[in-house]
Image (tube, helix red, strand yellow):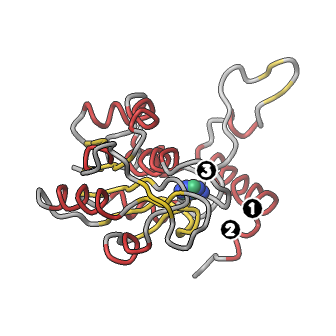
Amino acid sequence: MLRIDIITVLPELIESPMNHSILKRAKAKGLAEIHLHNLRDFSEDKHKRVDDYAFSGDAGMVMRIEPIDKAISFLKSQRNYDEVIYTSPDGQLLNQQTANRLSTLENIIILCGHYKGVDQRVRDHLITMEISIGDYVLTGGELAAAVITDCIVRLIPGAMSDETSALTDSFQDGLLAPHVYTRPAEYKGWKVPDILISGNEKKIDEWKIKNSLERTRSLRPGLLEHEGE
Ligand code: ADE
C-alpha cells in the first residue's frame, strides 16, 4: 500500500481532488492512503505563523524551518519514508517515468511550497527530491501536490477499473496515445477509420502503432529523439 502524507498551509485546496474518481476508489480499496497535515499545527508561534521575512531583505516571505522540521520529524517518528518531495518550479520536471517509480514506493511525504520559497536549510537537509509540474509559476505547491498524487495513485494496480488502460496512456511507452473512437461509427458524415470497425485485431494493432507514431512525430517530435536511450 502506498501512503502519501501532504504537508500544506492550505489543506482545503487539496481535499476535493483526493475524494473523487480514481483517487477515491484507490483509497476505498485500501490501495492508497492520503493524509493531509496543516503546517500551522506544527508552529510554536502564538499566531501559528509559518513564514518570516528573508534575511536578505528581499520582498516576500520565506517559509520557516522549525514547523517544517517538526512536521517531517513527527511523520518520520512513525514510519520510514522513501522520498520527501518538495514542490517547486525549480525542481525536476515531472514525467511518466518518475510517476511510475514513485507509484512503487511505500511512504512519501510531499511538502507544498508557498510564498517566496522555503528556508534553504529545508532543501539542504530535509528534502530528498524537488518536483516541478511545469515551467510556469503557481501560487503555491498545493495544486502541484494534487497533480503528483493523482498521476502516482492511478498507476497502482487495481486503482483503475480497466487495469490495462494505464499501460496504454500517452507517454507510457514514450509515445502519445493513438486516437480513440466510440459509437456511432458515423456521425454527421464524420467517419471512424474503417480498420477500427473491421474486427481484424492484427490490423487494428498495426493501425494503433502507426497512429501513435504519426501523432508523436507531428505533435511532440522531441519524444522520439530519446528513442533507444
Ligand atoms: N510551485 C509553484 N510553481 C510550481 C510548479 N510549476 N511546480 C511545482 N510546484 C510549484
Asked if labels 1 and 2 touch by Cβ distance under 8 angstroms, the answer is yes
Q: Is residue 165 left or right of residue 46?
A: right
Q: Which mark is residue 223?
A: 2
Dot 1 alpha-carbon crowd within 10 angstroms: few under 14, some 14 to 19, many 20 or more: some
Identify the residue shown where x is 32% and y is 44%.
Answer: 48
| Residue 126 in which image quadrant | bottom left
3D distance between C-alphas at marks 2 and 1: 6 Å
- Distance from mark 1 CB to nearest ligand 1 atom below 8 Å: no
Question: Ligand 1, what quadrant?
Answer: bottom right
When the figure is inspected, residue 5 is found, relative to residue 30, above or below; the finding is below
Query: Is residue 6 shown left or right of residue 139?
Result: left
- The answer to which quarter of the image holds residue 37 is top left
Q: Which mark, residue 63?
A: none
Q: Residue at x 66, y 55 (%)?
A: 176
**Residue plotted at (38% across, 29% down):** 19
Q: Find numbered disc 3 in the image and state the secondary structure of the residue it sits on.
A: loop
Q: Which residue is mark 1?
A: 220
Q: Amino acid at mark 1?
A: Arg
Q: Nearer the viewer, residue 201 or 58?
A: 58
Secondary structure beneath dot 2 equals helix
Name which residue type carries label 2: Leu
Q: Is mark 3 within 8 Å of ligand 1?
A: yes
Q: Amino acid at mark 3?
A: Leu
Looking at the image, how many numbered discs can be counted on the residues? Answer: 3
Instruction: Tell me the tag on residue 138.
Output: 3
- Tell me if label 2 and label 3 are in contact, CB under 8 Å: no
User: Residue 125: x, y in percent?
Assistant: 32, 76
SS of the residue at dot 1? loop
Residue 132 located left or right of residue 120: right
